[in-house]
Amino acid sequence: MNNFLRGFGLLVAVASVVACGRSVVVDPATRDAGARVYRSESCAGCHGEERGGGRLAPPLRSLARHWDEEELVRFLRDPTAFAADDGRIREMAARFPSKMPPAGTSDPEKLRALAHFLLAD
């Protein structure tokens, strides 16, 4: 019975993060590491403690509709490169006064953890 419950719990966790054909498997340890990066990189200063956005920057929720982990990591490294090619990003850049800076960390593990945290609503 325990194996059944564990398997069912994993199925529910995976199903809960499926959005518009994209899915993110939530690893709690990576999500927690990403939350620490979110705080240490001062993302909350513009996007809010709960990622709800504000007057300076958009909310960072339901991102799996638009991004997969690889794309989001590339964006975090160089947001301005995306603004040139992505109409949605250009529109947000025009709506919000704060320019999205590149992530302060270049550590690939930290960037992946941050992306995982942002995708795992």
Image (spheres, rainbow, N blue to C red):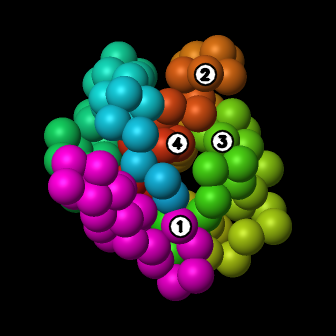
Helix, strand or loop for disc 1: loop
Q: Is residue 66 above or below residue 109?
A: below
Q: Quadrant of the C terminus?
A: bottom left
Which range is magenta? 1-23
Residue occupying the far bottom of the picture: 20
Q: Earlier in the sequence, mark 3 or mark 2?
A: 3
**Label 2: which residue?**
109
Is residue 91 something that shows in the picture?
no
Q: Quadrant of the N terminus?
A: bottom left
Q: Distance between the Cα atoms at labels 4 and 2?
A: 10 Å
Residue at x-position 41% and y-position 40%: 27
Residue 23's disc number = 1
Q: Distance between the Cα atoms at labels 1 and 2?
A: 20 Å
Badge nearest the viewer, 1 or 2: 1
Q: For the residues labelled 3 and 4, say whether their Cβ atoms are less than 8 Å apart.
A: yes
Please name whichever residue, 28 or 118, is drawn nearer the observer in this view of the structure.
28
Q: Is residue 90 above or below residue 82?
A: below
Q: Earlier in the sequence, mark 1 or mark 2?
A: 1
Please name whichever residue, 106 or 2, is drawn nearer the observer in this view of the structure.
2
Helix, strand or loop for disc 2: helix
**Label 3: which residue?**
73
Q: Is residue 99 above or below residue 91?
A: above
